Image (cartoon, grey):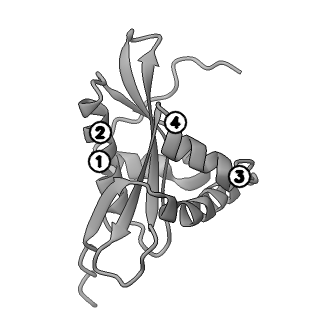
Amino acid sequence: MSAPEPAPTVTVRLATPDDLPETHRMLIALAAQAGASVRITPPVLARIALEGRAARLLVAHRTDSPQRHPVGFALLLVGRNMVAGAEWGFVEQLYVQEPDRKRGIGRALLTAAREMAAKAGCAGVTLSSTPELDGSALAWRSLGVDVLEPRFAAE
């Protein structure tokens, strides 16, 4: 039996233009998990991630690897929660590429998103998940996040 691989050294930061091509490829992979195709184009992604007031695109880089591209991302949206009546963060997407899953990168992205939301004055953070498609409910639980069924939905 071999010893577990050590966790990679990860840096999480706001995305730059150089991060967007790989982030777009990760969006395509995330959509494929749901049997969908990506409708967002790279220029629209750039507007959202780099120019949008409400969006913060966080990327994770392995500092122990020669790879220069991100291996994961989280999209944090900040705005007023109409139910809670307070500024709120919403992690719309969180994705880590294979083979870097289950190595602490998702945890680092979620921690950074929570910290960024708190600095923006958010009273809390809600996470979006599709557990029946990608097992994300198990991942959230392993990160110490309470997984609740939606209390209401609008279509």
Q: Earlier in the sequence, mark 1 or mark 3?
A: 3
Between the residue at mark 2 and the residue at mark 3, the CA separation in whole angstroms equals 26 Å
Q: Earlier in the sequence, mark 2 or mark 3?
A: 3
| Label 1–label 4 contact, CB within 8 A | no
Place residue 120 in its image quadrant. top left
Mark 2: amino acid: Met
Indicate the position of residue 101 as horizontal and vertical percent values.
42, 67
Between the residue at mark 3 and the residue at mark 4, the CA separation in whole angstroms equals 15 Å
Crowding at mark 1 (Cα within 10 Å: few <14, some 14-19, many 20+): many
Between the residue at mark 1 and the residue at mark 3, the CA separation in whole angstroms equals 26 Å
User: What residue is at 25 percent from the left and 40 percent from the top?
Assistant: 115
Residue 52, numbered label: 4
Q: Earlier in the sequence, mark 4 or mark 2?
A: 4
55 and 131: which is toward the camera: 55
Residue located beneath label 1 in the image: 112
- Mark toward the viewer: 1 or 4: 4
Give the structural element (helix, strand or loop) at label 1.
helix
**Is residue 22 at all visible to an observer of this figure?**
yes
Residue 116, numbered label: 2
**Is residue 129 at all visible to an observer of this figure?**
no
Mark 4: amino acid: Gly
User: What residue is at 34 percent from the left and 82 percent from the top?
Assistant: 65
Indicate the position of residue 17 as horizontal and vertical percent values.
50, 59
| Label 1–label 2 contact, CB within 8 A | yes
Between the residue at mark 1 and the residue at mark 2, the CA separation in whole angstroms equals 6 Å
Q: In the rendered view, would you say 113 is above or below 65? A: above
Indicate the position of residue 96 as horizontal and vertical percent values.
46, 62
Residue located beneath label 3 in the image: 41
Q: Quadrant of the C terminus?
A: top right
